Amino acid sequence: MRLSIILLILPIIFMLSVCKQDKPTGVAQDKSVSVSQDKSMNVSQDKYAIEREKMVSDQIIMRGVKDNLVLSAMRKVPRHEFVPEDKKKYAYEDRPLEIGEDQTISQPYIVALMTELLGLKGDEKVLEIGTGSGYQAAILAEIVKEVYTIEIIKSLADSAEERLKRLGYNNITVKCGDGYQGWKEHAPFDGIIVTAAPDHIPQPLIEQLKVGGRLVIPVGSVFQELKLITKTDKGIIEKNVIPVRFVPMTGEAQEKKGSKR
């Protein structure tokens, strides 16, 4: 009788033992998959972080940009998020890239240089003319309190706004419109940065600068010069920085082509 009972109990004990072993094995496999996915994501993120650091050290610092706020922003903003999928592998090269609608994202060095020229400290309100992909606006937003940016091409304005919101930039306001007249409702500005070239300096932008404020703008048709304009209580101080090549400013800038400020 005892032998019969023992023989009946043994299979039950064996089955319980197997069940106990199976559960941890399943959990371990799930963790393995999760860890593998996490590692894959981290490798991708690390790759871009390494490329950004190399971009800053080799392309920007080596060419004379020293402002720590600018360098920190350039290290942080993911430029690959602002270019088309087929351009991501070139995102951290020092060159402009096409973003559609015959427009480009400026090369990293120029973005850093123009931002540094504004002389920002952190609590300013800045206007950008020519949103494009939104990259320059994101760099500014890492530094200052408020950024207002205008893009004349609706498809670019819409995609930039969506992208900037997705990346968490809540201190940027995007508007679709002609930037030649600035954004009077939010003026005056501590700084204005223009990423398309008129052949003259738009007077409304000068008027919307605070005294002590700076305007950084490429000016010219065939041959362009990056200019730094500083507004004083007696007028403006104009300085030529470097020769550049930007897409032309469209809209009212074209209508007033050939006029002087």
Image (cartoon, helix red, strand yellow):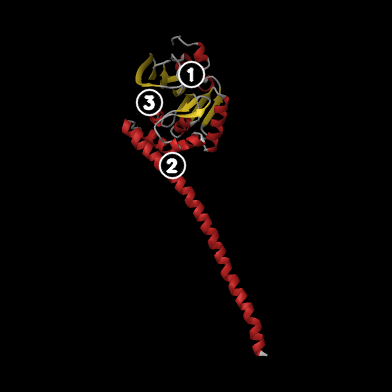
Q: Which x, y percent locates residue 158? A: 57, 29
Q: Comparing marks 1 and 3, which lies closer to the viewer?
A: 1
Contact? badges 1 and 2 (CB < 8 Å): no
Kind of residue at badge 2:
Tyr
Q: Which residue is mark 2?
A: 48
In the image, farthest residue toward the top? 259
Mark 2 neighbour class, 10 Å CA radius: few under 14, some 14 to 19, many 20 or more: some
Q: Which residue is mark 1?
A: 249
> On the rendered image, what quadrant is the C terminus found in?
top left
Q: Which x, y percent locates residue 70? A: 39, 33
**Whole-Å distance between the Cαs marked 3 and 2?**
27 Å
Give whichever of discs 3 and 2 has the lower sequence position. Answer: 2
**Whole-Å distance between the Cαs marked 1 and 2?**
32 Å
Give whichever of discs 1 and 2 has the lower sequence position. Answer: 2
Q: Which x, y percent locates residue 224? A: 39, 18
> On the rendered image, what quadrant is the N terminus found in?
bottom right
Identified at 52% across, 14% down, the residue is 252
Mark 1 neighbour class, 10 Å CA radius: few under 14, some 14 to 19, many 20 or more: many
Mark 3 neighbour class, 10 Å CA radius: few under 14, some 14 to 19, many 20 or more: some
Q: In what element is the residue under mark 1?
A: loop
Q: Which numbered disc covers residue 117? A: 3
Kind of residue at badge 3:
Leu
Q: Which x, y percent locates residue 170? A: 53, 35
Taking the image as shown, residue 18 lies to the left or right of residue 74, namely right
- Please identify the quarter of the rendering in which residue 13 is found: bottom right
Kind of residue at badge 1:
Met
